[in-house]
Structures are given as C-alpha cells and as structure tokens.
Image (spheres, grey):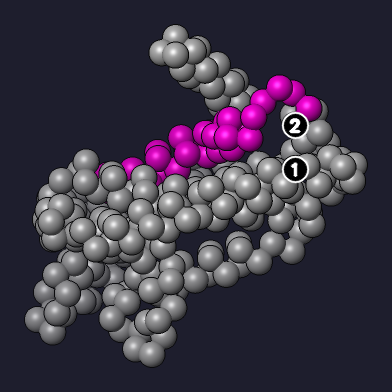
C-alpha cells in the first residue's frame, strides 16, 4: 500500500513538472512582460506608501490591522493576487488549451481529473507566490513595514482560502469547458473580492452591504492573515475564520470536482473539446 502511494506521488510529481516546464518556457519567452510586472508591483507599493502617509497615525481608526494602512494594503493586495490565481488559473488554462486546439489531446492522455487540475495550475501558483512575495518584500525593504505573529498560521489561512477559491475556479473551468465563454463566477467573485473582502478598506465600513462580504471566502482568509501578521494573534483568537474556511472547503471541493468531471464527459460526448 505504501509503495503504491509513493509510486502515485512520483507519477503526479513528474506530470506536474512537465506542465510547469512547458509553461515556464512559454513565460520566459516574454521577458519584457515579466519585468514590467515587477515594476508595476513596485509602483503600486510606492503609491500606497504616500497615500498611507495621509491616514497613518489617525487615532480614530478602531481596527488594529488598519493602524498601519500601508501594511494592511500590501497584505491585502498580495493575498488577493494569490487568491485570484487560485480561482482563475484552471479556467484560464482550459481557455488557452481551447484556443490553441490542444485541449482534446491533453484530455485524451491517461491523466485523471485531480492531476489535471493540479498540473494545469502549478505554474500560475509559482508566479503568484513570487509576485505576492514582492509586495511584502518591497514594503519591508523600502518602507520599513514589519510583520509579526506566526507565519505558519498565516500560511495555513492562505492555503485554506486558496483551496476554497480553487474549488470555485474548478466550477469556472467547468463553464469554460461546456459553454466556452460567459462564465458568471469570474465576474462576480473577482469584483466582489476586490470591493467587499476588505482589500482596500475595512469591511466594517460597508454598512448594509457588509452582508455581501460575509458570503465571500476571501473575507475570512484576508481577515485571518491580517490578524495573525499585523495584530500578532494566535490560533485560539482566529478559530472562527479558520473553521469557516474549513466548512467552505469541505462543501465546495468535492462538489466542484464532480461538476468538472461531468463537464469533461459532456464535452467529450458532444465532440466540442476543439471548439472555442
């Protein structure tokens, strides 16, 4: 049993490595785009630094995570970048394969659905990790932003929330597989996360619209990460958002994999894998 599990793990790692190597070669062929993305992160962090000087040190800010607006903003942007990668990577991979006419050949290989999901998204997560790190790095090295608290606990929030959003991303990819375009998840979750999850301002300021933030998984992930890294809270103090994310994941992950499997079978049956 153990040897079989190790064999399956080795096969998975080889397949993921093959996808990452392919996507890496494609990415490095556009070196200017990569450099411009690094420059854009630096410009955003610098801009937020000067905006934060307007609000920094205000005594009427009741939320500890927002006493340093720059720390709150760059944390929010770094986390949002990672979250949205989890949500959109698989759907984007499906659309690219459709546009290139290679989706059918990929799906005809002896590869199971979980492996396809992981391998198709792997390179996007490598990039997202790097660019999300740049937000925190530029804030620390250039503008003296310091974080405290448990980084492993913050990483747990990041992983849980990313898996929840990846589950929604699998549903988005299912729409892309069957309907090619017109995915409602991307529009609603993308704009909703940016506006209502507390990326740019506390959710407490939303008033009657705060109910929207309560149904968005990024709200709990971002709040938990800020409470850990900026306020220095421990596990016992952040149990509520952690458990909420666990419930989201327990419901959404198996459901999304089931829907994606049905979408693939329908596309194969209708012969629409090569259509875009």
Q: Can I make out residue 54 in this image? A: yes
Q: Give the range drawn in magenta.
A: 108-137
Residue 107 badge: 2
N-term-proximal mark, 1 vs 2: 2
Q: Is 254 within the magenta?
A: no
Compared with 19, 176 (above or below) is below
The reply to whether callout 1 and callout 2 are in contact (CB within 8 Å) is yes
Residue 264 badge: 1
Q: Estimate how packed mark 1 is, as few (under 14), some (14 to 19) or many (20 or more) residues with alpha carbons within 10 Å.
A: some
- Residue 178 in percent (x, y) is at 78, 52
Q: What element carries label 2?
A: helix
Q: Residue furthest bottom?
A: 208
Compared with 102, 263 (above or below) is below
Q: Can I make out residue 56 in this image? A: no
Compute the Cα span from label 1 to label 2: 8 Å
Which secondary structure dominates the residues rendered in magenta?
helix
Residue in the picture at 59% in, 21% down = 15
Q: What element carries label 1?
A: helix
Q: Which residue lies furthest to the right in this view?
A: 271
């Amino acid at each position: 049993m153990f040897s079989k599990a190790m064999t399956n793990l080795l096969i998975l790692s080889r397949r993921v490595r093959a996808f990452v190597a392919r996507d890496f070669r494609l990415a490095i062929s556009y070196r200017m785009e990569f450099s411009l993305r690094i420059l854009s992160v630096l410009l955003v962090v610098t801009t937020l630094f000067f905006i934060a000087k307007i609000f920094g040190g205000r005594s009427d800010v009741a939320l500890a995570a927002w006493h340093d607006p720059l720390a709150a903003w760059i944390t929010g942007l770094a986390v949002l970048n990672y979250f949205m990668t989890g949500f959109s990577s698989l759907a984007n991979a499906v659309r690219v394969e459709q546009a290139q006419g290679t989706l059918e050949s990929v799906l005809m290989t002896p590869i199971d659905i979980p492996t396809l999901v992981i391998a198709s998204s792997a390179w996007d997560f490598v990039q997202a990790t790097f660019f999300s790190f740049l937000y925190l790095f530029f804030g620390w090295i250039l503008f003296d932003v310091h974080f405290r608290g448990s980084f492993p606990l913050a990483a747990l929030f990041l992983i849980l929330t990313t898996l929840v959003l990846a589950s929604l991303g699998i549903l988005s990819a299912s729409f892309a597989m069957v309907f090619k375009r017109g995915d409602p998840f991307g529009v609603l979750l993308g704009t909703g996360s940016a506006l209502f999850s507390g990326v740019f301002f506390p959710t407490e300021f939303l008033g009657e619209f705060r109910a929207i933030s309560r149904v968005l998984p990024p709200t709990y992930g971002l709040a938990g990460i800020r409470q850990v890294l900026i306020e220095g809270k421990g596990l016992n103090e952040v149990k509520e958002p952690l458990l909420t994310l666990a419930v989201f994941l327990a419901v959404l992950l198996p459901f999304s994999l089931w829907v994606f499997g049905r979408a693939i079978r329908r596309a194969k049956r209708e012969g629409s894998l090569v259509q875009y």
